[in-house]
Image (cartoon, rainbow, N blue to C red):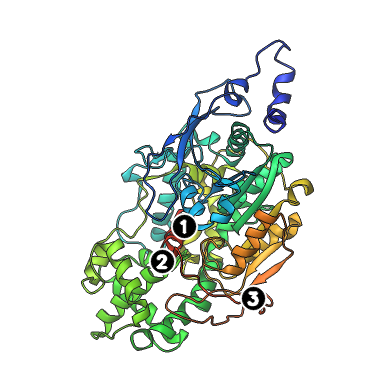
Amino acid sequence: MRLSRTGLVAATAALFAAAVPAAAADPLTPYTTQQLNWGDCPFKPAAEEKPAQCARITVPRDWADPAAGPELEVSISRVAATGERRGAILLNPGGPGGQGTPLAGALAALQPTVNQLYDFVGMDPRGTGHAGTDDLGFQCQVPVGRLPQGPLDARDRSKASIAAHQQTPRAVAEACQSDALAPFATTWQTAHDMDLIRILLGDEKLNYLGYSYGTWLGAKYASLFPGHTGKTVLDSSVDFEGRLQADFEAFPVIDQRQFDDVYLPWLARNFPAQLGGTAAEVKAKWERVRAYYGTHGLAPDTYDGVFVGNGSPFRWALGALIFLLGAQALDGTAAPGPAALEGDLDAVSRTTFGVSAAQLTTDRVAASNLAPDYKQVSGTRYAVACGDQPTRPAAWYKRLSDRQGPRYPLFGWAYGLGEPCGFWSDKPRHELPDVPAEAAANILVVQGEFDPQTGYEQATSGARSAGVPLVSVDDSPFHGQYALAGNPCVDGLVNVFLVKNSRPKDTTCPGVPLPGEDQVYPVAGPVRGTGASVQTRLSGDVTALRARVQDEISAVNRHR
């Protein structure tokens, strides 16, 4: 089959036409003619996953000048179509900086009907290393002496506290920008890697499924290579037609909304004897427990962070467990929780702290490593977030903290003081255009109403600006919907799009019950109306796999 290379060639032809003689070798040839040597993956699939094959491809460090600089290696994985192949679906879990190769086997197991027609292809984007190996990729080494010492509380607005909070983002930005790879670990470069994968797979179109930041990446691929954009699903979406950084700046707003309107009422329904019977009572106790932990070894910022970006049932259970322990210590009494959540709380305790929930103590919680480790951080995370587009200065973020803190105290005080992009001095090297109509015709956006990691308003703005349909999930507070939430309405609509080539119009799916509950408790929010005619219930198959993958996707997009 003759391969179309117009996408990659268009990006570089203008740079070479004037300077390179007609007879000179095409600098893209070594990359577009390499062979994919599939073999065993360096990671082992879980028992319920499908086994994948892995390969490595060589990419230029800079697609704008392929002959300059050292080459890079990118890992990809594949679970081949089980039936008559229509193409491949490239997967991205988000981040920025998330490794996608382990995702292929999981999603192929979760959506076998789609895998019958498509290869599921995972990718560890440039700068992220290689999953299953010791290679973590582009890591910023932050000197310990540059980081603040002692517990922090962003509600403390003294000059000393503000200066201490700003030490970390300044040190992170300087450490990451000092690495020569930083200007080349961007969405523009990764999108070109994606088109190379399309060529090496022998496909005219690249189909795509991306979560969170992966929606930005998929949309920008579509904007740069519209003629090669196949069916594209953008799940838990940023505003891909706006500023990427604006989606991070909205974290305090959407975190507070989920916390106040969904999480606290859920705690009140399930733990009334321990935490209070109303959301207001639970919130008042949460504040008292925050103060208790602050005097017993757990920094206030760290305690707040437990409840920030709570985009998965695992994180909900972790927050509940830590809150319950503090309330028990504060009140000096213990009351049994609901049996429906007992197993979840115990599993979270064993995974996070290494002991059963019955053995866990507040001292062990305080001594655990709950705070982010900034001594070594993902360079790709910040090279993309701060390098894709022009940034705003640290003073602007300080003023944002002053505005957001009083209204959204859960994360509003801390976010603006801790944003490394405020100290990022490098300018973007490439413009990222908006999605053209040619590509928009192949895109579908899916979004939960109370997602605390990508706001519903951001997804709506991107979908409306690009003129693409939006599948809204009413009352859903979690991050990652398709294949992960057990929602037959969402899965059905997306699968019909992928398998039957029928893209839905704007649709609202009802949500699924929250952990430990057997019914949906409606919450007023930005979604207007619900698909009442669609019966929604959790399906029983591969529930553990869904939950694990959803938490992994939430975790990779929670890194700040």
- Name the amino acid, label 1: Arg
Q: Nearer the viewer, residue 231 or 222?
A: 231
Q: Which residue is depicted at the point 55% across and 66% down?
A: 451
Which structural element holds mark 2? helix
As measured in the structure, the alpha-carbon distance from the residue carrying label 2 to the one carrying label 1 is 11 Å
Residue sitting at the far front: 83
Q: Nearer the viewer, residue 357 or 434?
A: 357
- Callout 2 touching callout 1 (CB < 8 Å): yes
328 up-or-down from 500: above or below: below
Which structural element holds mark 1? loop
- Name the amino acid, label 2: Arg
**Mark 1: few/some/many CA within 10 Å (<14, 14-19, 20+):** some
**Mark 2: few/some/many CA within 10 Å (<14, 14-19, 20+):** many
Q: Which mark is residue 315?
A: 2
Residue 86 visible from this viewpoint: yes
Return the residue at label 3.
Answer: 534
- Name the amino acid, label 3: Val
As measured in the structure, the alpha-carbon distance from the residue carrying label 3 to the one carrying label 1 is 31 Å
Q: Earlier in the sequence, mark 3 or mark 2?
A: 2
Q: Give the x, y percent position of residue 453.
A: 53, 62
Q: Quadrant of the N terminus?
A: top right
Q: Give the x, y percent position of residue 172.
A: 43, 45
**Mark 3: few/some/many CA within 10 Å (<14, 14-19, 20+):** few
Q: Nearer the viewer, residue 416 or 208?
A: 208
Which structural element holds mark 3? loop
Q: Nearer the viewer, residue 232 or 334?
A: 232
